[in-house]
């Protein structure tokens, strides 16, 4: 069963180039990808993640509101008793915020230079370490 | 360009050169790649000669500056009269915070003002809207009412300096706030010069800041164009923008084609009112990016002017030369800046700024070296401004007009970009026009495909980023001092908003909002009622929300 990822765009920020490229690259690499579209609230994102039964929520945020958005998502997951969906992020996130986000339980933050292979490796690693104990076949590999 | 005899001679001589010189040389030293492509993916020839521009008629397609088709520039003297307007965008925190940055930039020699609003203001949300949490004053300035607008440009002479505002779905409200602020400070509307972005079409296409569906939103743009034509003779009521389309990953051709397709859409909308095209077309203005691919960008700017001139003349029958004249602002490419080794962005920005100048821009924002990391710090903005000043004062390129004209390569690229634009216009018509193309995600899919293509070229190392994909220094990434986010700005803004609301007359507010709602349901111009509301200290969010049940709201079908 392939890893299933929700690519999410929270808040008012409309910068969706990165989110769309990541969505496409992960799909080409064999993962199952759901893209939320723009202007999602943390509630909408968590609801979609639960309904779609994803392994990973990948949050793309370039507006600077990450220290508002990530805590909300983590709190909502906790309130709903979800502890096996890994939350990762990317976008414009200043380095000194990364440790703070990790303390909140965000598993990985990818910067703008991350390659497809970095993303795949990172996602596989966090799912293996923190994700659901599902039997998976056919590890994802990047498209040529 | 070249006469026939010369052309045959050149072809023959080129053939001989290939046999005698090129091939033996390449046997000894092969080229390092099988093909060289522009950033947009266009294959570059090894060498361009007069043969490559034999189809380019100098008088009809290149011509002279200040005359249609304006390939060589919109004005007869270009930078010999005065350099382009140096217009660094600024905006963060409250109106007071941004006012201080404006005054710093003016003190450093900046010649125009450009205003960046925060996400809530851009999306028509007041600072106290729940959706605004975490975003108030964060990546632009928070403006809720005319009281904020008064402080934003405090002590700046609005009759002397041109002011640009980057605002879209709620642009008509911010324009009203600007006009009321000017009025309350005793300035004459007829003397105001400046630009409001107000380009909703590219929001659906690429920037993705919208509130209402395309049809009512385009009507609001129409109303501001019509109002401005009658009341603001020196003001640009729309800045039709390709910047965001390119930043979203489009090619150079898509950038120009989709932008001008939007321009065509606005012209058609105003013409439906029976207004003469020559009465408003001269005030339409444009905005492009300057990306890192130098030759392609110079060609792009030149092509954009030529295409618009032809569109206005042939499609809309514009008689006045000014109606065919494309004037544009440029910003260097945020997407070209890297988070690694951020000082390298100074070099990138300088190349891009030079391309904009050699492409004939009217105004320019150069990005700070910290563009990929945060909104710009004051030192980053100072170097960015200095980069423009060095080009204007030291490089010598401002002394002669359109100096790359006649370059075989640049003229070929210019003509190819022009042809690519007209092919897209045909495609848009075939697909049922601008609004249908937006609703069916045509532009959005084209951009997503181009963005993914470039991404894959980078992954395959066909397009390198210095310090990132090539020459990467893994010993560490140099730190630069970044803009400090003032966490208290949001609270200060909420206090300002509460104070405005406490001072105003609620009966007047209700009446003004009811009048806007009434006008919205007719085909009357929305501006007079909006100006009245703004005078009564109605907030932007209140007006935007009032019209949601009438106009509806827009939801994009997500694609990737």
Image (spheres, rainbow, N blue to C red):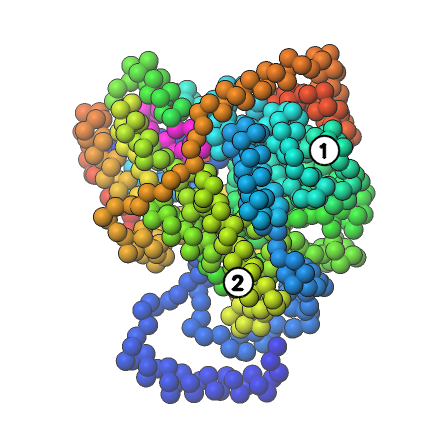
Chain letter of mark 1 equals: B
Residue B82 showing in the rendered view:
yes
Which residue: 71% across, 13% down? B505
How far from the left and from the top, in percent, is residue B542?
A: 63, 20
Which of B136/B280 is in front? B136
Q: Is residue B391 left or right of residue B81?
A: left
Question: Against B345, is A106 above or below?
Answer: above
Residue A20 showing in the rendered view:
no
Which of B527/B396 is in front? B396
Residue matched to label 1: B182
> Do marks 1 and 2 share a chain?
yes
| N-term mark: 1 or 2 | 1
Which of B108/B456 is in front? B108
Chain letter of mark 2 equals: B
Marks 1/2: CA–CA distance: 37 Å
Which residue: 56% across, 65% down? B397
Disc number for residue A105: none
Question: Against B434, is B410 above or below?
Answer: below
How far from the left and from the top, in percent, is residue B488?
A: 46, 23
| Magenta span includes A61 | yes
Which quadrant, please, contains the N terminus of chain A? top left
SS class, disc 2: loop
- Mark 1 surroundings within 10 Å by alpha-carbon count, few (fewer than 14), some (14 through 19), many (20 or more): many
| Magenta span includes B437 | no
SS class, disc 1: helix
Range shown magenta: A46-66
How far from the left and from the top, in percent, is residue B245?
A: 52, 46
How far from the left and from the top, in percent, is residue B162?
A: 66, 44
Which residue: 26% across, 40% down? A120
Residue matched to label 2: B394
């Amino acid at each position: 069963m392939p890893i299933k990822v929700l690519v999410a765009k929270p808040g008012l920020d409309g910068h969706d180039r990165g989110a769309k490229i990541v969505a496409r690259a992960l799909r080409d690499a064999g993962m199952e990808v759901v893209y939320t579209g723009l202007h999602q609230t943390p509630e909408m994102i968590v609801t979609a993640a639960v309904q779609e039964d994803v392994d990973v929520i990948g949050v793309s945020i370039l507006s600077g509101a990450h220290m508002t958005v990530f805590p909300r998502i983590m709190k909502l997951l906790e309130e709903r008793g979800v502890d096996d969906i890994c939350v990762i992020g990317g976008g414009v996130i200043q380095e000194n915020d990364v440790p703070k986000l990790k303390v909140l339980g965000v598993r990985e933050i990818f910067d703008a230079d991350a390659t497809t292979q970095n993303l795949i490796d990172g996602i596989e690693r966090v799912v293996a370490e923190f994700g659901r104990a599902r039997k998976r076949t056919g590890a994802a590999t990047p498209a040529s | 360009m070249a006469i026939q005899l010369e052309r045959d001679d050149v072809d023959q001589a080129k053939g001989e050169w290939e046999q005698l010189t090129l091939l033996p040389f390449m046997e000894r030293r092969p080229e390092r790649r099988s093909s060289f492509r522009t950033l947009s993916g266009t294959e570059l020839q090894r060498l361009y000669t007069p043969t490559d521009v034999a189809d380019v008629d100098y008088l009809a397609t290149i011509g002279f500056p200040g005359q249609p088709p304006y390939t060589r520039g919109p004005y007869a003297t270009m930078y010999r009269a005065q350099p382009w307007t140096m217009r660094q965008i600024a905006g963060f925190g409250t109106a007071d915070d941004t006012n201080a940055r404006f005054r710093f930039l003016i003190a450093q020699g900046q010649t125009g003002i450009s205003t960046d609003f925060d996400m809530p203001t851009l999306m028509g949300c007041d600072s106290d809207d729940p959706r605004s949490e975490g975003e108030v004053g964060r990546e632009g300035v928070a403006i809720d009412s005319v009281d904020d607008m008064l402080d934003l440009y405090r002590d700046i002479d609005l009759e002397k300096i041109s002011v640009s505002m980057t605002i879209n779905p709620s642009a008509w409200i911010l324009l009203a706030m600007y006009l009321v602020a000017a009025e309350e400070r005793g300035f004459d509307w007829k003397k105001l010069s400046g630009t409001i972005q107000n380009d909703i079409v590219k929001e659906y296409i690429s920037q993705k800041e919208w509130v209402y569906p395309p049809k009512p939103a385009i009507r609001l743009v129409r109303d501001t164009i019509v109002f401005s034509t009658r009341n603001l003779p020196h003001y640009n009521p729309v800045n039709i923008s390709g910047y965001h389309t390119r930043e979203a990953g489009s090619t150079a051709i898509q950038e120009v084609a989709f932008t001008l397709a939007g321009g065509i859409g606005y012209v058609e909308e105003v013409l439906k009112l029976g207004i003469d095209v020559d009465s408003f077309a001269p005030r339409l203005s444009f905005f492009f990016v300057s990306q890192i691919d130098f030759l392609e960008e110079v060609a792009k700017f030149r092509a954009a002017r030529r295409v618009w001139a032809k569109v206005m003349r042939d499609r809309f029958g514009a008689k006045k030369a000014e109606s065919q004249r494309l004037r544009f602002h440029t910003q260097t490419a945020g997407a070209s800046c890297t988070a690694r080794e951020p000082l390298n962005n100074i070099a990138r920005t300088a190349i891009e700024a030079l391309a904009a100048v050699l492409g004939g821009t009217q105004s320019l924002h150069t990005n700070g070296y910290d563009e990929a990391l945060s909104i710009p710090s004051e030192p980053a903005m100072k170097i960015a401004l200095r980069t423009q000043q060095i080009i204007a004062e030291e490089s010598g390129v401002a002394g002669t007009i359109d100096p790359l004209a006649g370059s075989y390569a640049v003229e070929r690229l210019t003509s190819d970009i022009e042809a690519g634009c007209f092919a897209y216009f045909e495609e848009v018509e075939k697909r049922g026009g601008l609004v249908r193309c937006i609703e069916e995600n045509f532009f959005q899919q084209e951009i997503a495909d181009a963005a993914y293509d470039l991404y894959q070229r980078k992954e395959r190392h066909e397009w390198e980023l210095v310090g990132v994909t090539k020459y990467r220094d893994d010993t560490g990434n140099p730190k630069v001092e970044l803009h400090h986010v003032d966490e208290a700005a949001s609270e200060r803004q909420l206090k300002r908003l509460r104070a405005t609301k406490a001072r105003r007359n609620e009966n007047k507010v209700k009446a003004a909002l009811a009048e806007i709602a009434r006008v919205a349901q007719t085909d009357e111009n929305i501006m007079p009622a909006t100006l009245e509301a703004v005078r009564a200290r109605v907030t932007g969010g209140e007006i935007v929300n009032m019209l949601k049940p009438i106009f509806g709201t827009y939801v994009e079908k997500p694609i990737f």
